[in-house]
Image: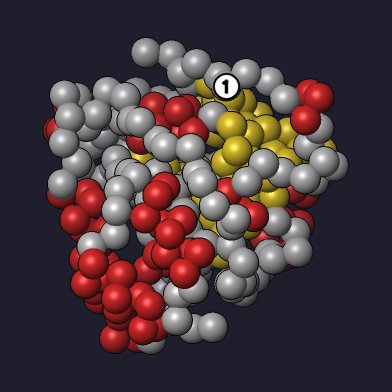
């Protein structure tokens, strides 16, 4: 399913509204804490991983983030990411871009967002799936039609704020083919629906979203680069076990 092109501009306005309308007590209107409601629904992406499912554990300088990986929906992205992680490619790199209420991005060993690589030595195509979407907490492969490093090692977490969908926009999304369960999920947890047919979703945070939010709150320069370095110490690939689940990490203030 492809989104009707006439809707993309309206959805882009949604992202702009999210960025412009963030209230709170922090710098630039950034909230010191973000209350994210527990998801109530049947979208598998937003539920706990199945026992034995592949996961990635991100050890950052602000705490730990755990995400399930969707090898069935994005096999190339997952293969590339897990192989690079197991090589140690991500060890010690930084989050080079943070946009409050939007995304936090890493994956470039050069640290400036201008580089990256794949295990094949060439970019791979965007992988679309109607089963996974750009809900808040989605783990996605950075992609741009005009960027030669697209489909490389760079990735981002969706850090959109929770909030109800505007009725008019919801009606347009319904007309463009978004199913009801996806609309309800976006209304509950937030997200970036206009990216559903442009970027690859290959994972979802199930623990440590407060760390993603802490990264997103970082003060940045005009290019979105954090003024204080935020490090990705390592990425560990493992299998999910409910018995091994750890308490949520507490981000450093």
Residue 169, image x and y in percent?
Answer: 26, 70
- Quarter holding the N terminus is bottom right
Left or right of 142 in this view: 238: right
User: Which residue is at the front of the view, 156 or 203?
Assistant: 203
Residue depicted at 57% across the width and 49% down the height: 46
Residue 15 found in image quarter: bottom left
Residue depicted at 49% across the width and 33% down the height: 209
User: Which residue is at the front of the view, 110 or 186?
Assistant: 186
User: Is residue 38 in sight in this rendering?
Assistant: yes
Q: Residues within 10 Å of mark 1 (few under 14, many from 20)?
A: some
| Scheme of image coloration | secondary structure
Residue 111, image x and y in percent?
Answer: 47, 40
Residue 13 found in image quarter: bottom left
Residue extending farthest right: 52
User: Is residue 112 in sight in this rendering?
Assistant: no
Above-or-below relation of 251 to 128:
above
User: Which residue is at the front of the view, 54 or 99?
Assistant: 54
- Quarter holding the C terminus is top left
On the image, numbered disc 1 is attached to which residue? Answer: 248
């Amino acid at each position: 399913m492809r989104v009707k092109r006439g809707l993309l501009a309206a959805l882009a306005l949604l992202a702009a509204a999210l960025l412009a309308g963030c209230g709170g007590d922090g710098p630039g209107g950034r909230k010191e804490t973000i209350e994210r409601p527990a998801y109530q629904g049947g979208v598998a992406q937003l539920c706990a991983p199945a026992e034995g499912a592949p996961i990635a554990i991100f050890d950052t300088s602000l705490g730990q983030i755990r995400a399930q990986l969707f090898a069935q929906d994005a096999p190339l992205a997952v293969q590339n990411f897990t192989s690079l992680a197991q090589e140690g490619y991500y060890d010690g790199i930084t989050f080079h871009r943070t946009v409050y209420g939007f995304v936090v991005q890493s994956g470039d060993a050069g640290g400036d967002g201008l580089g990256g690589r794949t295990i094949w030595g060439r970019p791979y195509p965007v992988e679309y799936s109607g089963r996974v979407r750009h809900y808040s907490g989605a783990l996605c492969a950075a992609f741009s039609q005009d960027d030669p490093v697209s489909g490389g090692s760079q990735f981002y977490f969706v850090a959109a704020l929770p909030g109800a969908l505007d009725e008019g926009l919801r009606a347009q999304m319904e007309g463009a083919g978004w199913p009801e369960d996806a609309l309800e999920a976006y209304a509950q947890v937030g997200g970036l629906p206009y990216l559903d047919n442009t970027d690859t979703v290959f994972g979802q945070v199930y623990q440590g979203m407060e760390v993603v939010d802490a990264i997103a709150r970082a003060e940045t320069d005009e290019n979105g680069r954090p003024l204080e370095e935020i490090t990705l110490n390592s990425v560990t690939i493992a299998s999910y076990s409910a018995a091994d689940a750890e308490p949520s990490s507490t981000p450093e203030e």
